[in-house]
Amino acid sequence: MSRAAALLLPGERTRGDLRPGRAVLAGSAGLTWLLFQSAVLPPIGLGELPFDPLLPLVAAFALGGRRVEAWVLALALGYLADFFGGVASGRTMLRYAVVVGMALPLHGRVVLRDRLVPVLGVGIFTFVAGTVLLVLLTLMGAEHASDWAKLPAESLGTSVAAFVCWPLYRRIAGWEGDRTARAKRSLQ
Amino acid sequence: MSRPALQAAAVLALLAVLGWHVHSRLKPEADLNFADRALLTVTGPVQKAMTGGVRGVGGFFSGYLALVGVEKENERLRAALKIARADLVEQNELRVQNERLRDMAGLKSRVAAQTLGASVIGRGTSARFRALRIDRGTKDGIEPGMAVLGVEGAVGRILRAGGSFADVLLITDGLSAVGSVVQRSRARSVAVGDGDGDLELGYIRRPDLAQVSEGDVIVTSGEDGVFPEGVPIGLVTLAQAAESGLFVNAQVEPAVPLDRVSEVLVVLEPGRGIQSTYPRGPVVAGSLEDPQVADPWGPPLLGVGSRR
């Protein structure tokens, strides 16, 4: 049976069902956060945050199976994050792309009804993507010893950020129409 | 080839391209591409407005929020106190701003080269890189590679510049290296950012350990062609012979509190020196916490206070 002819539940989208508005909303939210982080947080002593709240947003799109939006978002938000990071290194873009590459195949294979599984997943994604990046930088001779030391705390911090932000990110990623959400409502 | 295999190949190809992109950017790009330029033009004014708003409101709230939660019977007195404190905060802000501007004017007069004052409007969000964004750009004559100074010493260098804004790579960034001299012994070295807010002194050989000790002031050598000679970089907080290796392990705390710097000077003529009033001679070694040392930075750089 072809993919297009697959049986769909009411409200369920096909793979070709693009919703660019969601990605634009996520990109705008990401840009707003980066502006806030670069201009507002440093003067009040919060310049260095040990977490990345944008990574769970990218993961939310990927885990939701939004293939095109997730890739576009990973590249766009990664570019913006690198730009606001001060040095256009491309590292965040690569990290987000690794996350999307890991998360997309998990769509439909893991149960995402509550926050815990996604939060655990985001922690693992952060750690693995960070490790991939650092291994790459090590091969290039550009890693720094402190980068490895920061990775566990960054993974944990990003997990906590995901725990707090996940309900919002689910909405932005447009999960309200998916099977897990309906199943949850039907059980209530 | 099956569709999943094609998709996997496409993903791997994309990751390979991104990896190549990272490799090509190991040395930061000085040129802004079209997208960067457009982003800087759009987001720069927003950052400037947000930073200005936070600075304006921040001083008020720091004094004001402490009053929240006091008992009701004191409300009238508290209201009067609030007004008085708000006035005081405003006056303090003006005083601090005035002092800062006077400091900047003082520094300007000491730098022989032509300089340009700028305000910090944003900071890098990356945990890996250390950078600032300032409200001056190519329209003001700023170009990549120019030195950026603070009241207390070296801040960084211009990494890239757009029309009205520019990014500054701080001296504490892992990509930064500044030609330096130990002020007491005149031992030459390179101050490299450790990416964690401090610097490390490179290329002082183990037999020359006596040339550098805790409390020594490190200044720019001027040999890198970026920073003027004699600008304070920082204070040595650790100097020891490593268990292995050819060189001394020396850590330097930056002279400028880089997490709080809000005004800077851009040296428009790279490599031009500082006037002779700048402290060049040997200074007494000591730690920042040592009360016996009046001011480890020697004579006040700008005639106003020390780095603390």
Image (cartoon, coloured by chain):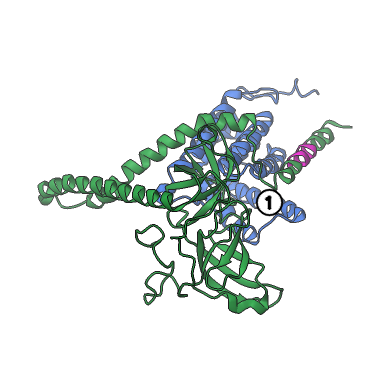
Q: Is residue A111 above or below residue B33?
A: below
- The residue positioned 55% from the left and 34% from the top of the image is B138
The residue that label 1 is drawn on is: A128
Residue B13 in magenta stretch: yes
Residue B32 coordinates in the image, percent (x, y): 63, 35
Residues A168 and B209: in front is B209
Q: Is residue A81 above or below residue A136?
A: above
Q: Is residue B279 left or right of residue A24?
A: left
Helix, strand or loop under label 1: helix
Q: Which residues are magenta?
A: B11-18
Any idea which chain is the blue one in this picture? Answer: A
Q: Is residue B38 left or right of residue A17?
A: left
Residue A37 in magenta stretch: no
Q: Main secondary structure of the magenta part?
A: helix
Residue A140 coordinates in the image, percent (x, y): 76, 53
Residue B85 coordinates in the image, percent (x, y): 20, 49
Q: Quadrant of the C terminus of chain B?
A: bottom left
Q: Quadrant of the N terminus of chain B?
A: top right
Residues B229 and B123: in front is B229
- The residue positioned 30% from the left and 47% from the top of the image is B98
Any idea which chain is the green one in this picture? Answer: B
Do we see residue A114 in this rendering?
A: no
How crowded pointer 1 is (Cα within 10 Å; few <14, some 14-19, many 20+) is rated as some
Do we see residue B126 in this rendering?
A: yes
- The residue positioned 71% from the left and 76% from the top of the image is B244
Quadrant in the rendering for residue B162: top right
Task: Give the amino acid at mark 1.
Answer: Val
Q: Is residue B225 left or right of residue B54?
A: right
Quadrant in the rendering for residue B187: bottom right
